[in-house]
Amino acid sequence: MTTLDTTDRRVLAALDDDPRATVAQLAMDLGLARGTVQARLHRLASGSALRPHSTRVTTEALGLPMRALVTADVEQDEFDDLVADVSRIPEVVECVGISGDSDLLIQIAARDADHVYDITQRITRCRGIRRTSTSIVLRELLAYRTAHLLPR
């Protein structure tokens, strides 16, 4: 886990404001040396502070406007095989282990309801899946966000 200092937070806040900003632009805007910004970005990208760039691409832009959340109960002794199987389903955009009544929360992107059904059937056939439950996302009310956590 990366520990963020004040400079890291300033760089991340500026990058959140303009994800396409160049190192030179960030350095100028923040009053930092280009080498400092470059080194910080490299360290932050190498650690866990920055999500992959592809998370900014909307599934709608890829022809997959429908999203669904699939919860799954799994056989614990097949967990590693299960994760490998789920990772091979291209429409799975995220899979997290959760506590509570289910073991996994899997977010999928689909063309329509029939496609959701097809994807959930493929998930059900993954090794170790005992049971799934699917909820269709009707509307995104708050998008994934972190900017408000960075002091300005």
Image (cartoon, helix red, strand yellow):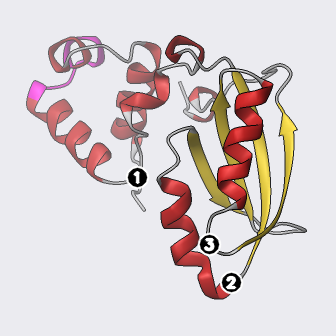
Question: Label 3 neighbourhood size at 10 Å, few (<14), some (14-19), many (20+)?
Answer: some
Residue 76: x %, y % from top left: 68, 84
Of mark 2 and mark 1, the one earlier in the sequence is 1
For numbered disc 1, what is the local secondary structure? loop
Tell me if 65 is positioned left or right of 150 in this view.
right
Q: Which residue is mark 2?
A: 76
Residue 90 horizontal/vertical position (percent): 50, 41
- Determine which quarter of the picture holds residue 113: top right
Task: From the viewer's side, name the closer residue of 26 and 86.
Answer: 86
User: Could you say whether the residue bearing mark 3 is in a helix, strand or loop?
Assistant: loop
Q: Mark 2 or mark 3: name the one nearer the start of the chain.
A: 2
- Say which residue appears at 64% left-offset and 31% top-offset: 109
Q: Tell me the residue that label 3 is attached to.
A: 127
Q: CA distance from mark 2 to mark 1?
A: 26 Å
Q: What is the spatial separation of the Cα atoms under label 1 and label 3, in whole angstroms? A: 29 Å
Quick check: is 31 in the magenta stretch?
yes
Picture disc at residue 48: 1
Which range is magenta?
Answer: 27-34
Of pointers 1 and 3, the one earlier in the residue sequence:
1
- Graded by Cα atoms within 10 Å as few (under 14), some (14 to 19) or many (20 or more), the crowding at tag 2 reads few
Question: Which quadrant would residue 50 be assigned to in this image?
Answer: top left
- Establish if 132 lies above or below 44: below
Q: CA distance from mark 2 to mark 3?
A: 11 Å
Q: Quadrant of the N terminus?
A: bottom left
> Comparing marks 1 and 3, which lies closer to the viewer?
3
Q: Nearer the viewer, residue 132 or 52?
A: 132
Mark nearest the camera among 2 and 1 is 2
Q: Residue at x 63, y 29 (%)?
A: 145
Which of the two marks, 2 or 3, is nearer to us in this view?
Answer: 3
Q: Quadrant of residue 110?
A: top right
Question: Do labels 2 and 3 touch, CB within 8 Å?
Answer: no
Q: How many numbered marks, from 0 up? A: 3
